[in-house]
Image (cartoon, rainbow, N blue to C red):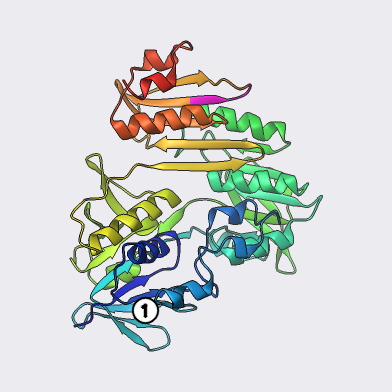
Amino acid sequence: MSDRIVIVGGGQGGFAVAAKLRALKVERPITLIGAETVPPYQRPPLSKKYLLGEMAFDRLLFRSESWYADNDVDLRMERYVERINRETRDVLMQDGQTVSYGALVLATGATPRRLPGHIGGDLDGIFVMRDKQDADRLAGAMKPGSRLLVVGGGYIGLEAASVARKFDVDVTVIEMADRILKRVAAAETAEIMRAIHLSHGVDIRENTGLIHFEGEDGHVRRAVLSDGDIIDVDMVVVGIGVTPNDQLAKDAGLAVANGIVVDAYGRTSDPDIFAVGDCVEQPYRGERIRFESVSNAVDQGEAIAAILAGSDKPYVAQPWFWSDQYDVKLQIAGYNGGYDRVVTRDGAREGSKSVWYFKGDEMLAVDAVNDARAYVCAKKMLGAGIHPKPAVIADPQTDLKALTTS
């Protein structure tokens, strides 16, 4: 029986497992299977510094290609797994090769939702943002004076809008809900971010959907909106969420819900198969959650590596996230699901603010806008299980740092 650890997926989570295993001096053979033509790399800068041309791609690589050979990690690029055979304990790749495993880690990530073809979603000039190829295609289309329509007012859409404005592109954002960031943030945070985008010349239209596109010579040229308006466009960025890549697991008979179901140790319904990152539905505070964040993929991946090395310590998520838009850094600590009260607090610097989420008197999360102090303090409180009352946070005289040790 093979003792090889096979990792399917070369993103943040998959690389984190491999790197941590070697850092822990685990000597079992490792095969890392990735679909892209390049070694694993950081994805967040793709939609920011890389897209702007401020960061070369080689700076995004986690390690040089030689690192994998030097550390006995069998890196298979331009490969994807077609089938898992749990009986023979191997995976079949599209080139017909099989790799046997003693332990299998699924780090298959998620796929951006695309617009259906019947509304013109198959025209040229319509982009999503997930990998290097997406960023390269979009960068080639960003020309000063061109017109961009962003479909979806979430973080991906708003980040695309901020980058486009730096290229001097005219930007319209449409959001079907009654406000931007509806799914992920409170109205108070949405209002702060809306004002920032408006100040940079972005046209934000809420309660507005897309009816269809019109094209010329196969390229998108106009968008017909639900408010009856028809706008000229040269390109479109679609940011309407992602779906977990869980079909491989489903076909193998593993438990799947909103992603691949795992326990607190990252194990699927097969104890020899683990899963990590955006493709995973995991336990969190009595619920089952799928976190779409780099931090969760890395932390969970390192925890799974430790478990494969013999640890019996479960993974306890400590969610955090960030979004860079213009010169604004939005940092988020915690998970705001189920909040029933919000407190807004001004920071020490001009224009800095934080939005604190509570369920009763329990603090759940914070959105910190250019307020690193609030973010760091909230993260420490959440990690230590400290829950200051909403009135204490709302008091401008409260010393947040002092609360971290109370």
- Please identify the quarter of the rendering in which residue 245 is found: bottom left
x and y, in percent, of residue 269 in the image: 19, 63
Around disc 1, counting alpha carbons within 10 Å, would you say few (fewer than 14), some (14 to 19), or many (20 or more)? some
Q: Position of residue 370 (x, y in %)?
A: 57, 31
Q: Image check: 220 left or right of 292?
A: right
* Residue at 27% in and 59% down: 306
Q: Give the secondary structure at mark 1.
A: strand
Q: Nearer the viewer, residue 87 or 26?
A: 26
Q: Which residues are magenta?
A: 350-354
Which quadrant of the rendered structure holds the N terminus?
Answer: bottom left
Q: Nearer the viewer, residue 313 or 278?
A: 313
Q: Residue at x 40, y 54 (%)?
A: 298
Residue 384 rendering spot, x and y as whole percentages:
30, 31
Can residue 170 be seen by looking at this rendering?
A: no
Report the residue at 36% width, 61% height from top: 20
How many marks are shown on the rendered structure? 1
Q: Main secondary structure of the magenta part?
A: loop
Q: Does residue 230 belong to the magenta stretch? A: no
Q: Which image quadrant: the C terminus?
A: top left
Quadrant of the rendered structure where residue 392 is? top left
* Residue 387 shows up from this direction: yes
Rendering quarter of residue 83: bottom left
- Image position of 357 with respect to 129: above or below: above
Q: What kind of residue is marked 1?
A: Glu
Residue 310 placement (x, y as % from top left): 20, 61
Query: Which residue lies under the disc numbered 1?
Result: 82
Q: In the displayed orientation, state which residue is furthest to the bottom.
A: 96
Residue closer to the observer: 241 or 100: 100
Vertical position of residue 400 compared to residue 366: above or below: above
- Name the residue at 73% across, 63% down: 140
Q: Is 216 placed left or right of 27 in the picture?
A: right
125, above or below 321, in the image = below
